[in-house]
Every structure is written in structure tokens, then in C-alpha cells.
Amino acid sequence: MDPTATILVVEDEPAIADAVAARLRAEGFGVHVAHDGPSGVAAAAEHAPDLVVLDVMLPGFDGLEVCRRVQAQRPVPVLMLTAREDEADTLMGLAAGADDYLTKPFSMRELVARVHALLRRVRRAAELARDGEAAPVQRIGDLEIDRSGRRVRRAGTDVHLTPLEFDLLACLAQRPAQVLTREQLLAQVWDWADASGTRTVDSHVKAVRRKLGGDVIRTVHGIGYAVGG
């Protein structure tokens, strides 16, 4: 738990916004709330939150545009809320820079678990950066993964991945040709103790493939995913 973290909730339905804010405050977080796209972007600039909980459907402009503008200001983990379990909507959210998503209706317990997991990942990445230990650049075919700089190149071209997409690719590439199950990836990348989010893994794999090409991460049907081999 990180009681010093500040969270911005951008949600136009007052009942949902109030319930989410109340639960996060009960967890010890500082919480700010906005109810439309423009005020969400302004609140992010004013408060510099450690994490944003962001609804897709918003007045003014939608959550995808909010995500793009907020990420352009400064990198921040985004948990996106979507009303429909639509894969196209999910992929658009991930492409806009979201790190994770929840489909409405969701349990507050699940939302809190996702928030804690995202903040743990950010904290671990910051600790590794402070340690300053330079990791060698890993090359798999024409793919280059720079763990220290958190950069990826394919065929000599830089490819922008969100922090979670990078962690997913790096986790798979750390064991070339080894197949990791969705449950293993949830535990190692998302830091989840249960296997309730296997579709989340599938959605993020699709997002990485859209950016790097369909041949980088291979599916081993009935088991999971692998890089190389």
C-alpha cells in the first residue's frame, strides 16, 4: 500500500465517481475527481497524479483523447474503465496509452487490486532506475530490447510501448523460446495473485503485436505465449 500516492478519477457518472473516490480514500490515497474530458486533462496538469482512473465515455471529449493528452504532459499509469467488453475499444484504449482496463460493472475490490498492482510496477521500475545497473541490450532477430533505457527497436526503428507493454515484452524475452502461461504473466508482469484477468493478457499481447508485428510474440495454443524459438 502506498498512502502517499495521489489518484485522479475522471468519471462522468456521479454515483460511480463518488463510490470510487470514497473507496480509494478509505485505502489511504489522496483523490481528485473530474467529470468530463477537459477538466480531467486540467486536473492532471494541476495535481500531477501518480495514477489516473479514467472512464472511456466522457462529455467534452472522450477518455481516449484524455489519455493521449495526459500522457503527452507526463508519463502516468492509466486504468481505463469501459462500459462494454469490446476488444476494439480495449485495444484503442491501450493504443492511447492506458496500462490496464476494467469493464463495467466492476467490484471495488478488483479496482483497488488493479490500482495497487499498477503502483507497485511503477515503484519497482523507479527503484531499478535509481540502482543504475546497466543491463545489456537484448537482441532477438531484428528486435532490440534496452531494459535500462526501457526502449524497443524493430529493424532499427524505435517503437513506443506503454510501460506495461514493455514489461510484458521484456518478461517474455527474458526467457527466449520458453512458453509462459497467462497465469504466470499475470503474476510476473501485473503482480496479480489470481488468474481472473487472463483476457487482459490477451489484449495487451494484441496491442504489442499491432506495434511490433504479429511475429514477435507467438501463441502456443492451450498454453500461453513466447518470444523467439
Image (cartoon, rainbow, N blue to C red):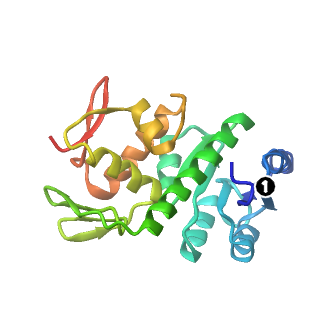
Q: Amino acid at mark 1?
A: Asp
Residue denoted by label 1? 12
Towards the viewer: 180 or 82: 180
In the displayed structure, 206 sits above or below 9; it is: above
Q: Quadrant of residue 66?
A: bottom right
Identify the residue shown where x is 47% and y is 34%.
199
**Tally of numbered discs:** 1
Looking at the image, the residue that sits furthest to the top is: 222
Q: Is residue 53 visible?
A: yes
Residue 64: x, y in percent? 58, 60
In the displayed structure, 211 sits above or below 15; it is: below
Residue 184: x, y in percent? 40, 33
Residue 113: x, y in percent? 64, 40
Q: Is residue 106 visible?
A: no
Towards the viewer: 118 or 57: 118
Q: Secondary structure at mark 1?
A: loop
Residue 229: x, y in percent? 14, 40
In the displayed structure, 203 sits above or below 36; it is: above
Identify the residue shown where x is 45% and y is 60%.
162
Q: Is residue 26 left or right of residue 110?
A: right
Q: Is the residue marked by circle 1 packed among few (<14), some (14-19), or many (20+) residues within 10 Å?
A: some
Identify the residue shown where x is 64% and y is 47%.
116
Q: Quadrant of residue 182?
A: top left
Towards the viewer: 113 or 99: 113
